[in-house]
Each structure stands twice: as C-alpha cells, then as structure tokens.
Image (cartoon, rainbow, N blue to C red):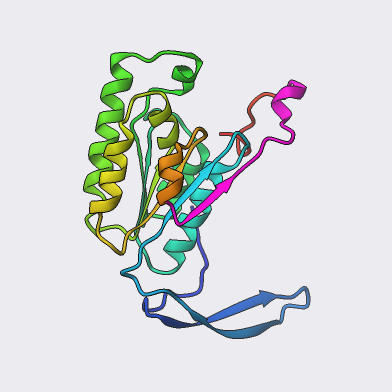
Amino acid sequence: MCNLSIVPSVERTCKQLACYVFPQPAGWGFFIWREFSFMPEETGLVIVYTGNGKGKTTAAVGMGIRAVGRGQKVKMIQFIKQPGLLYGEAVALAKCVPEFEVCQVGKGFSMRKGGFSEEDVEAAALGMQIAEQSMNGEYDLVILDELNVAVAKGLVDVDRVLDMLKKRCARVNVVITGRYAPEVLLSVADTVSEIQDVKHHYRAGVKSRAGVDV
C-alpha cells in the first residue's frame, strides 16, 4: 500500500505560506515558516533538459512531483518508452500520485540506432496529438519526455512543436526532455539545462538496474 505523507496543499496564489516539519531522532521536530513569492499562473514557462548525460527524465519527473505538491495537475507524454513496459517512474506515479498522469506512446529506444518504422511515425503522431490536446489548461504542467529525440530523428516536425507552444494556454508550464534539442527550441525556451555525460556505469559493464535506470 502506498502512503504519501505531505503538507496539505494550499491555494495557488502569488504568495503562499509554507510549513516544513523536520523529524528529529528524539521524536520531536521543529517548524520553519517561510513566505514564498510566485509568478502569476498566466506566465507559463518552457523548460528544456537536454545533453548526453543521465538524468533528464528524472529531473522532469521531480519537477512534476513538486508541482503535484502545490496542488497542480501534471501530464507526461513519453515519446520513446513503450506502453506496458514497467518503468519505475510510471509504476510509482500510477500507484501513489494520481494527479500525475503518464502516457507512453513510443516503440522503444531501438530507433536511436538508425532509421525508424512506420509504427514509430504513427506513435510520434499520436504523441503529438495527445500533447496538443493537453495544452488547453486542464494540466498545469505538461512533460514531453524524449520529444527532442523524436524531432532530431525526423519523427516530429519542430515547427509543429513551436506552434503548439505558441498556441498553448498561457499559464501551462512545459518541460521537454531528450538529447539533440534543436537550436530553435533552445532559443524559445525560458530555461535550458544541458546534462553532460562525465561518467556512466554502462561503460564499466554494469547493466541497467531496477530503481536506478528503469
């Protein structure tokens, strides 16, 4: 059974009062009251996580959980990961965080090795259709996981992505992940983080591990 213990959500206003409780070994805790200032909801942001390092999807999921903690609704469309495969983040979110929807439309990572099939094209088209429908304001944050890869491989036209971002409900925040982010997308993004591959356990012969990689 999944049990999430979080501070009750507060109304989404420009200023909110947050209370943090830090448990102590002796069984007592202390409180910190802090006033946060937020941008008005109508100013949605575009955030890009790119680069060849590990952690782009992980960062996006973390932001999504943060948004849920603020009483927001989140949707993530995964353009590469296949429906039915038990990726840890999708399993955990389905069990514990119903406000965070995950939609997997991809056909796997095999297309990265060169070329793609008609099924890949159809899957990417479905992903874009779902993404465009999700920009109407029903969700506060929309995550387009590995969309950069789909664009780089020619599965999705970058102009369609730019048009979607321009026409979205103005208060919707959008996170786009994946290596090979096109320059034109970086130019319209509000925040860009490039995650570099300094060292990776794969190269030491360590295979994918549950809870770490999948």
Q: Nearer the viewer, residue 141 or 32?
A: 141
Residue 56 location (% of width, % of height): 55, 42
Instruction: Check residue 8 for magenta coloring.
Output: no
Q: How many marks?
A: 0
The magenta stretch is 189-206
Q: Quadrant of the C terminus?
A: top right
- 126 versus 43 height, above or below: above
Tell me: 21 left or right of 148.
Answer: right
Q: Nearer the viewer, residue 183 or 74?
A: 183
Tell me: 54 left or right of 39.
Answer: right
Q: Nearer the viewer, residue 128 or 210?
A: 128
Can residue 48 be seen at all in this image of the molecule? yes
Residue 95 location (% of width, % of height): 43, 49
Can residue 81 be seen at all in this image of the molecule? no
Q: Nearer the viewer, residue 134 or 168?
A: 168
Q: Residue at x 36, y 24 (%)?
A: 154
- 181 versus 63 height, above or below: above
Tell me: 62 left or right of 207.
Answer: left
- 170 versus 75 height, above or below: below
Q: Residue at x 22, y 38 (%)?
A: 129
Q: Residue at x 27, y 52 (%)?
A: 166
Q: Residue at x 33, y 25 (%)?
A: 155
Residue 82 location (% of width, % of height): 40, 28
Residue 198 location (% of width, % of height): 73, 36
